[in-house]
Image (cartoon, rainbow, N blue to C red):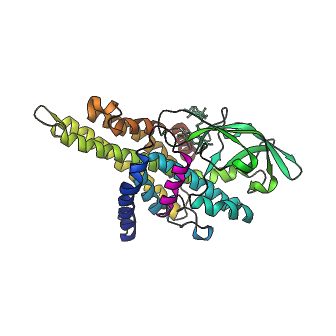
C-alpha cells in the first residue's frame, strides 16, 4: 500500500489551500448563521469549480474535470476545513449533476449539466419525507401520469440546497412500490421550498420541497420509470465518503484550533498544552482523526479502482461521523469556557459535526449494512 500523495496531488492541494484562505474564507466567514444568499452561493460555486470542486466527479465527456476520487476527496477535505457548509452545498450540487449525467436525456444534459457544473445553476436531490427517511420505500409523494406529463403531489423534507435550488432531482411513486426519478425545475414547473432551522451547518440550506399539483413532462424522467431507487442507491458509496470528508474537515479545523489555543493559553504558570492531560486530549483527537482519514481514503481508493466500496464506505461513514463528535467535544474541553461561546470556532464545529451521523444512512443504518455483509443476514427485512 502506498500512503504517499503524488506531486500533482500535493501541488493541487497546496494551491487549493492558498486559494481557500485568500478568496473563499473571507466570504464564508461572513455567512455563518443563515443560508448563503443564492447569488453569494453561485459566486462561491463558480470559484470552486475552477479547482475541480463541484465538478470533479463528472467525467470530462460530461463537462466535468473527471478527477480521481482520492484527489477530489483531498480537495473536499480542505474545503470542509474552511467551510463545511460550502463543501456540503458544492457536493449536493455535484450530486445532482452526476444524476443528470448518468440518467438524463441529451436534452436535459444540454440544459442542466454544464450550467450546474459551472455553478450557474443549483440542484438538489429530494428523496426523504417527513415519514420516510431510513425507510425510503415508505415515501408518499406521487407522480400520476396524464398523457405526456406527470402530476406531482407530496412533500420532501431535510433537502440540502433546497432554498437555493433552481431544480430538484426528486423520487416519486409512479405506481405500487414503483419509484421514478424526475428533474423538476423551480421556475418552469413550480415547486415551493421552506427553510428549516437546525442545530448546525447553518449556511448550508436545508428544508422542505413541496409539490402541489406540479406538472412535469415525461421527458424529465431521469433513467427509467421504476428505476428511481436504483439511481439513488448508486450514489450512496460516494455520498457516504463525502459526509466522512466533511467530518475530517471539521475534525482537522477543531484540532488545529485546539493546538493553537493550547500553545497560547496559560494556566499554573505554563501553556495549558504543557499539562499532560491536555496533551492527552490533543493526542486522542489526532489519533481518531488519523484513523478516520485512513478509512475514508481507503474507501475512496477502492472507488478509483472500480471495486465496490459499499462496506468500506459504510464503515468510514459510521466511524468518522461518530469520531468527530468526540473530536469536536474535546476541542471545546481544551478551550474551557471560551469553547462554548461563539467567540471561538469550536462551538460551531461541534454543532455542525452533530449533523453528520444522520444523512446518507444514519450510524445505525450503516452498521446494518456492515452487519449484513459480515453475517449474511439482512436485518432491514
Ligand atoms: C444534514 C442533513 C442533510 C440531509 N440532506 C438530505 C438531502 O439532500 N436529500 C434527502 O432526501 N434527504 C436528506 N437528509 C435526510 C436524511 O437522509 C434522513 O434524515 C435520514 O435518512 C434519516 O431519516 P429520518 O431522519 O427520517 O430518521 P428515521 O429513519 O426516522 O430514524 C430515526 C432513528 O431510528 C433509527 N432507525 C431507523 N430504522 C432503523 C432500523 N431498521 N434499525 C435500527 N435503527 C433504525 C435511525 O438510525 C435513527 O436513529 C438530510 C439529513 C441531514 C441531517
Q: Quadrant of residue 195?
A: top right
- The residue at the far right in this view is 147
Q: Is residue 80 left or right of residue 219?
A: left
Q: Position of residue 69 (x, y in %)?
A: 49, 61
Residue at image point 37% right, 64% down: 15
Q: Nearer the viewer, residue 303 or 93?
A: 93
Residue at image point 60% right, 58% down: 116
Residue 334 can be seen, yes or no: yes
Where are the magenta residues, as a range?
30-52
Against 225, is 8 above or below? Answer: below
Residue at image point 55% right, 50% down: 39
Q: Quadrant of the N terminus?
A: bottom left
**Which image quadrant shows ligand 1?**
top right
- The residue at the far left in this view is 269
Q: Position of residue 247 (x, y in %)?
A: 43, 45
Q: Quadrant of the C terminus?
A: top right
Residue 310 can be seen, yes or no: no
Q: Position of residue 208 (x, y in %)?
A: 64, 37
Tally of marks: 0
* Magenta run includes residue 68: no
Q: Is residue 147 left or right of residue 143?
A: right
Against 222, is 305 above or below? Answer: below
Q: Position of residue 317 (x, y in %)?
A: 48, 46
- The residue at the far top in this view is 337
- The residue at the far front in this view is 39
Q: Quadrant of residue 380?
A: top right
Residue at image point 79% right, 57% down: 219
Amino acid at each position: 500500500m502506498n500512503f504517499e500523495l503524488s506531486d500533482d496531488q500535493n501541488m493541487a492541494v497546496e494551491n487549493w489551500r492558498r486559494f481557500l484562505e485568500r478568496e473563499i474564507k473571507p466570504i464564508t466567514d461572513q455567512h455563518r448563521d443563515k443560508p448563503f444568499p443564492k447569488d453569494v452561493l453561485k459566486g462561491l460555486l463558480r470559484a470552486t469549480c475552477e479547482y475541480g470542486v463541484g465538478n470533479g466527479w463528472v467525467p470530462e465527456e460530461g463537462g466535468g474535470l473527471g478527477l480521481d476520487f482520492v484527489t477530489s476527496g483531498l480537495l473536499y477535505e480542505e474545503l470542509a476545513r474552511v467551510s463545511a457548509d460550502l463543501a456540503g452545498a458544492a457536493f449536493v450540487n455535484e450530486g445532482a449533476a452526476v444524476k443528470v449525467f448518468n440518467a438524463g436525456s441529451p436534452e436535459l444534459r444540454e440544459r442542466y449539466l454544464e450550467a450546474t457544473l459551472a455553478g450557474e445553476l443549483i440542484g438538489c436531490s429530494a428523496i426523504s419525507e417527513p415519514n420516510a427517511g431510513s425507510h425510503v420505500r415508505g415515501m408518499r409523494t406521487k407522480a400520476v401520469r396524464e398523457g405526456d406529463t406527470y402530476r406531482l403531489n407530496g412533500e420532501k423534507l431535510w433537502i440540502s440546497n433546497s432554498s437555493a435550488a433552481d431544480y430538484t432531482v426528486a423520487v416519486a411513486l409512479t405506481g405500487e412500490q414503483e419509484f421514478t426519478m424526475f428533474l423538476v425545475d423551480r421556475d418552469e414547473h413550480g415547486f415551493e421550498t421552506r427553510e428549516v432551522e437546525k442545530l448546525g451547518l447553518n449556511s448550508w440550506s436545508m428544508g422542505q420541497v413541496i409539490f402541489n399539483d406540479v406538472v412535469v413532462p415525461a421527458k424529465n424522467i431521469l433513467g427509467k420509470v421504476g428505476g428511481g431507487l436504483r439511481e439513488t442507491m448508486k450514489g450512496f458509496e460516494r455520498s457516504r465518503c463525502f459526509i466522512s470528508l466533511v467530518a475530517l474537515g471539521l475534525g482537522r479545523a477543531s484540532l488545529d484550533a485546539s493546538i493553537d489555543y493550547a500553545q497560547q493559553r496559560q494556566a499554573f504558570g505554563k501553556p495549558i498544552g504543557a499539562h499532560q492531560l491536555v496533551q492527552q486530549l490533543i493526542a486522542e483527537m489526532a489519533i481518531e482523526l488519523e484513523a478516520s482519514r485512513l478509512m475514508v481514503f481507503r474507501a475512496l481508493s477502492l472507488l478509483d479502482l472500480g471495486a465496490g466500496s459499499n462496506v468500506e464506505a459504510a464503515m468510514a461513514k459510521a466511524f468518522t461521523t461518530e469520531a468527530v463528535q468526540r473530536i469536536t467535544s474535546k476541542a471545546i474541553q481544551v478551550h474551557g469556557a471560551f469553547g462554548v461561546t461563539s467567540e471561538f470556532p469550536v462551538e460551531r464545529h461541534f454543532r455542525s459535526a452533530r449533523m453528520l451521523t444522520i444523512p446518507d444512512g444514519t450510524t445505525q443504518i450503516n452498521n446494518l449494512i456492515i452487519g449484513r455483509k459480515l453475517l449474511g443476514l439482512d436485518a432491514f427485512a
